[in-house]
Image: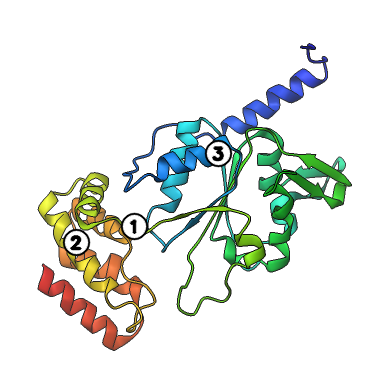
Amino acid sequence: MLAPTPRAAPAAAAALLLMDAYRVAAEPYYRSVGDELALFEAACAQRLPVMLKGPTGCGKTRLVERMAWALQRPLITVACNDDTSVGDLVGRHLLDADGTHWQDGPLTLAVRHGAICYLDEVVEARADTLAVIHPLTDTRRLLPIDRRNELLKAHPDFQLVVSYNPGTPGAPRELKAATRQRFCALDCSYPGTEVEVEIVARESGIPTDLAASLVALGVRTRRLQGEGLDEGASTRMLVRAAQLIAGGTAPAAACRMALVAPLSDDPDLGAALRAAVDASF
């Protein structure tokens, strides 16, 4: 193996330092509900892109964080939205006092240095933006950087992970088949009642019986999906209510703040949800 040149050595050290900032320092708590951890790891071992499908707040992001920690790879997360452009992912030229220089975007950083790039709610990104990931999702594993006239070969440790919530009522768009079929997919959902109680109690520190009451309330709200609610209370929302309770907030007040108000602006539906809270606590 050739020794690095004097000029290359500082650049390599700087890259390592940069990637250290994206490492997950401590093991995140993640309660598996099936074989998703093993399947995720198997896809990574074969350098296959992974898609996580499921409702918001069900643990998709925590799963990615857990796997980044387990695989000891940096994790670079992009929260996609309507304004996410190719430049936001790939990079752009910047002008400063020293002139013009190129700055890698988050996707390019991950491709160049071997990190996991997690595109959260990828369906929210502009359709023309998603085309840039296509060459990364097949055997080529290439990222074209047109603005630099560069064709970047992905680092062996690079991993692409995306998530989205399919079938959300009123969703502005769906992920195109041409993109969706390039991924191995894991279906994520809310855990079973017993597991969800365990998660809420573990994440907040409240007693199990109180966590069980919260989860039961959450399950009731989910039955209203399509009957006035786009989605019911997520596991994340239940954890937030539990954290408020752990901090000293009365359970009913915590639920009104963390569940009822965020779920709906409709006065009648809000009144029904508040009644459910009062019946639960």
Is residue 107 left or right of 3 when viewed as pictured?
Answer: left
**Amino acid type shown at disc 3:** Cys
Residue type at numbered disc 1: Arg
Can you give x and y, in whole percent of width and height, for residue 185 in the image?
A: 51, 54
Residue where numbered disc 1 is placed: 236
Compared with 45, 129 (above or below) is below
Q: Residue at x 54, y 61 (%)?
A: 121
Q: Position of residue 249 (x, y in %)?
A: 19, 59
Q: CA distance from mark 3 to mark 1?
A: 26 Å
Q: Let me know if residue 126 appears in the view.
A: yes
Local secondary structure at mark 2? helix
Nearest the camera: 231 or 101? 231
Say left or right for 274 vs 46: left
Question: Label 3 belongs to which residue?
Answer: 44
Kind of residue indicated by mark 2: Leu
Query: Which mark sits nearer the N-terminus, 1 or 2?
Result: 2
Crowd around label 2: few <14 · some 14–19 · many ≥20 (10 Å) = many
- Disc 3 versus disc 1: nearer the observer: 3
